Amino acid sequence: MIKNKVDGSGIKIYSDTFENFDLLELASSDGLFGEKEDVYLYDSISKVDIWTEVKKILEELHNSTRNFIFIEQKIPAEAKKTLQKWTLVPEEEFAEKRSTGVFDLANKIARRDKKGAWLTYRREIENGNNIELIHGTILWQIKVLLMIKLVDSKCGINPHVFKKNKSLAQNTDERILWDEYRQLLCMRHERKRHFTLQDAVEKFILGR
């Protein structure tokens, strides 16, 4: 299903990371443990080369049980006309600001570089990056490692990303990945009662 409403966390795909994902695979596959996360596509319509690819599979995205949500600063008239066949286009579009540093952080998390990850995390916080986005990126990274560890297949992951993470997944104990995945999930539900998400993520990084 194609939507335009932003109502939660999920898989976030930006224009400069678009090639890392297989949208058709995501449209047809279950998520980890059977849940289907929403997929947020940032600036995928305004970039002509990406929109050309996305436009070819709009029907598949529309028919998927996942929600594919487009987030844009401005949608070109031609694209609006095309999208209106599948979903309502909002009058006010917006894009979430983010730093490429969150992906640098994810890489350091995957390599288990505690000092590097903490320094990058502190820099992102001081630069005002969204803690929900940072948390979601770390959760995504651990999820990728766990999926590769469990099923040893691409699972909708771009071959380059799969190759880059495969050796890291193989060198990490499965029990550790499970524990870290559960910790990150619990942060979503318990942060309001016991601690801030920012403190919880920092504690997670320093405790690895």
Image: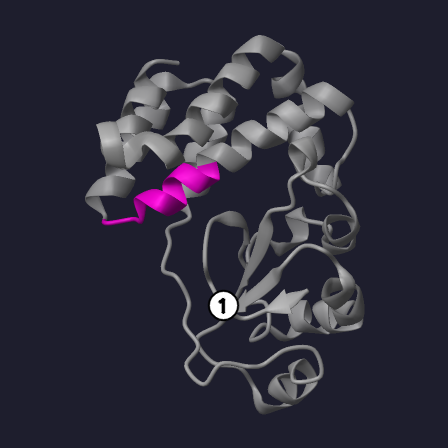
Residue 32 as seen in the image, left or right of residue 135: right
Which element type, helix, strand or loop, lies under badge 1? Answer: loop
Q: In which image quadrant can residue 203 be found?
A: top left
Name, please, the residue furthest toward the left.
126
What secondary structure predominates along the stretch shown in magenta? helix
Q: Pick the quarter of the image with the C terminus.
A: top left
Amino acid type of disc 1? Lys
Is disc 1 surrounded by few (<14), some (14 to 19) or many (20+) residues within 10 Å? some
Q: Is residue 154 above or below residue 207?
A: below
The residue depicted at 24 percent of the width and 41 percent of the height is 125
Q: Pick the quarter of the image with the N terminus.
A: bottom right
Q: For residue 10, say whether it is visible.
A: yes
The residue depicted at 53 percent of the width and 48 percent of the height is 10
Residue 181 as seen in the image, left or right of residue 155: left
Looking at this view, is 65 or 92 the one in front?
Answer: 65
Q: Is residue 164 above or below residue 127?
A: above
As for residue 206 lying within the magenta part, the answer is no
Instruction: From the image, tell me which residue sits under label 1.
Output: 5
Q: Which residues are magenta?
A: 128-137
Looking at this view, is 41 or 121 the one in front?
Answer: 41
Looking at this view, is 148 or 17 the one in front?
Answer: 148
Looking at this view, is 149 or 69 the one in front?
Answer: 69
Residue 92 as seen in the image, left or right of residue 68: left
Q: Is residue 21 above or below residue 180?
A: below
Q: In which image quadrant can residue 177 be found?
A: top right
